[in-house]
Amino acid sequence: MSATPDCGTRRHSFSGHTTTVPHPDRMTFTPPEHIPKQPVFELSALSGGPVGASSSPPSLRDAPYQRPVNRGSLAIALALRHIGLSGRNEVLVPAYHCGAMIEPILAEGGVPVFYRIRADTTVDLDDMAQRRTAATRIVLVPHFFGFLQPLKAVRAWCDAHDLILIEDCAHAFFGETEGCPVGTQGDYAIGSTWKFFPLNEGGCLVSFRHPLNAVKTHAPRLSEELKAVVNTLEYASHYGRFGSFNHVFKKSFLLKDWLVRRLKPDSPSLAPQCRTGEIPSPEDFVPAPFNSGFDPKRTTVSGSLWARWVTEKSSSSFIVEKRRQNYLTLLKASATFPGCRPLFPHLPEGIVPHVFPLVMDQPMAVFGKLKFAGVPIIRFGEFLWDEMDKGTCPISEDYSRRIFQFPCHQSLRPHELNWMIQVLSAVLTGSGSLPSHPDQRAS
Ligand SMILES: Cc1ncc(COP(=O)(O)O)c(C=O)c1O
């Protein structure tokens, strides 16, 4: 099963440990996640109809100009290529970021210039204005964790200074705020479909404002098309989503892994601890070196047919309602958790969250415990770009260290969500024993 990366970079961290490069005597080890971090493929979640049905909030699918690609980072690169950077064009990016937002800028010859965010994650426009120079050409603004930020003022500022706005909707495929549907304020909008749909990879470059005819992409190879299907199904079988057929799927994937190992003996294998059954303790936890998933060689490869089909056929109302419902369940539960607070204590109408972000008082005291209990944790912005000056944005540095994100996606089953809540409660209160592995065959 191929893993999708957390969103951080291999760069330095403000989280207390300064690097992800493991000590030579310590192997990296990623504890298995007992519940899915990402949406999981299930036939029952396909509506047979297109996303964007009238009862659902707006989505990036509504844009008149579309280019499906493999990842959101590739969509950023493609947008920059369409704009055509010259000389040392500067791109204003948030100080709270991940490598997948910065690497495409460097790959396309741009210079990232970091601006501050406010505590509610919105753009600090005064700071942004101070950082504008004659070389500034582009502004990248993300909607962090799916909570759309009002962009009318940023849009007006960009217009006043002849700047191009890229709306980064990697965390926000759906929604609207202040009467502005997602993606409509940017000259371009980029999406990361694998975060909202049951896919191993997938992204899109869209525009509500400019035709994208000049953006040329080509179809992926047949092997990549097949890999897209296999990876999706393998992830689903890992989490027991095929009912009574699950064991057949699991056996087929074991056979596939065995064949791959025979044909490619140097392909990555399990760390020694896993092979011998000797599992390291939370104190020994060394995260694997981070890989943002950005591969500049794939910038002009279009999204797989499979990803396009799944995106089109998935029921948007199911995705939207379930994510909101799961978020509210986590929000309610978090009221009893000591040592943390939800970053967004309200879920406004029109918002479709990507994850549930919790701001931890003592992040390093609980991180290893939660990971080793099997809880999937996403750490957007854990590793900030090396060349960003320390002190650029104290809020971003604090959030980089203290915000953990937990899944609230549509595929979580009630018992999985409850299990995660129980583990969070046990670890944060430091009382009681951890609940055992959730039975994936239940419910
Ligand atoms: C805000 C933001 N923008 C862009 C990206 C890139 O998306 P992808 O992972 O699909 O390349 C990410 C990745 O998580 C992200 O968090």
Image (tube, grey):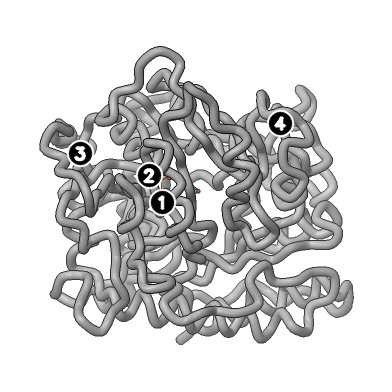
Q: Residue at x 66, y 24 (%)?
A: 387
Residue to which mark 2 is pinned: 159
**Which image quadrant for residue 439?**
bottom right
Q: Amino acid at mark 2?
A: Asp
Disc 4 to disc 3, C-alpha distance: 32 Å
Residue 103 shown left or right of residue 253 in the figure: right
Local crowd size for mark 2, using a 10 Å CA cut-off: few (<14), some (14–19), many (≥20): few
Can residue 245 be seen here? Answer: no
Q: Earlier in the sequence, mark 3 or mark 2?
A: 2
Q: Residue at x 18, y 49 (%)?
A: 66
Residue 218 at what x, y percent from top left? 14, 32
Q: Alpha carbon of mark 1 to alpha carbon of mark 3: how far? A: 29 Å
Q: Nearer the viewer, residue 250 or 206?
A: 206
Q: Are marks 2 and 1 in contact (CB under 8 Å)?
A: yes
Circle nearer the N terminus (4, 2): 4
Disc 3 on helix, strand or loop? loop
How many residues crowd around disc 3 within 10 Å: few (fewer than 14), some, or many (20 or more)? many
Measured in 3D between alpha carbons, the distance from the residue under mark 4 to the one under mark 2, in whole angstroms, is 35 Å
Of the numbered discs 4 and 3, the one sitting upstream in the chain is 4
**The residue tagged with tag 4: helix, strand or loop?**
loop
Residue type beneath disc 1: Arg
According to the picture, the residue beneath numbered tag 1 turns out to be: 155
Q: Secondary structure at mark 2?
A: helix
The residue carrying mark 4 is 12
Mark 1 / mark 3, whichever is N-terminal: 1
Amino acid type, label 3: Ser
Compared across the picture, whether 305 is left or right of 272 comes to left
What residue does disc 3 label? Answer: 302
